[in-house]
Image: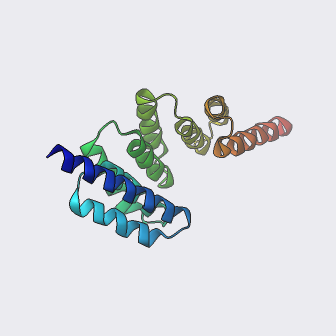
Amino acid sequence: MDIIKKCMKKIFNEMLENAAELCDVQEFVEAIKIYDKILDEDPKNVGALVDKAATLQRIGNNKKSLELFDLALEVSPKNVDAIIGKGSILHALEKYDDAINLYDLALKINNKFALTYAYKGLALGEQGKINDALKYFKKALSIDKDLELANISKETALRLLDSKKIKK
């Protein structure tokens, strides 16, 4: 029985890689078909749930995406990708406090994931907390100096702070 599970896991991982490649070339519908095939066989496959949720988010289906992130979190409550994904949906829905709470949870689980710091910085920035946001962008860059989202956001925050100084 173990050998069958190992084989299925390998097949599912290959399918997830194929779906990710399709997403890279914006073939979202085809990627979703692959995620659905995996989920038909293994409805609790967290990788497929999270990746399908992220794909649905990319095409603007936030409601279904949020449902899938929630399902992934029921299966694996400490899955950082699902936590961050759900946070990004809540952020898009302008529920910044809820998003920040999820980013904080993700940071408790893994405080070395630069993207989480960048996302929290964005949410703080949306709340007008530019100085706090800047701290999180800098922390993200201290982990991954090439993280484009953090670089761009940091520069934007600095420009906003400079414009506030000039107005005073």
Residue 160, given in percent of the width and then of the height, sits at 75, 42
Q: Residue at x 71, y 39 (%)?
A: 154
Instruction: Quadrant for the C terminus, please.
Output: top right
x, y (%) of residue 100? 47, 38
Taking depth in this image into account, of 96 and 115 the one nearest to the observer is 115
Q: Quadrant of residue 15?
A: bottom left
**Which residue does the image show at 75% across and 41% down from the upper left?**
155
Q: Is residue 50 left or right of residue 60?
A: left
Examine the rendering and report whether any part of residue 49 can be seen. no
- Residue that appears at 37% across and 62% down: 63
The image quadrant that residue 62 belongs to is: bottom left
Q: Nearer the viewer, residue 5 or 117?
A: 5
Left or right position of 166 against 75:
right
Q: Nearer the viewer, residue 13 or 49?
A: 13
Quadrant of residue 120 within the rendered picture: top right
**Colouring of the image:** rainbow
Q: Looking at this rendering, what residue extends furthest in the front direction?
A: 3
In the figure, is residue 42 to the left or right of 11? left
- Residue 109: x and y, percent? 40, 29
Location of residue 114 with respect to 22 vertically, above or below: above
The residue at 70%/41% (across/down) is: 151
| Identity of the residue furthest to the left in this view | 1
Relative to 84, residue 108 above or below = above
Give residue 43's position: percent from left, percent from top.
23, 56
Q: Image check: 28 left or right of 1? A: right
Number of numbered callouts drawn: 0
Q: Is residue 8 visible?
A: yes
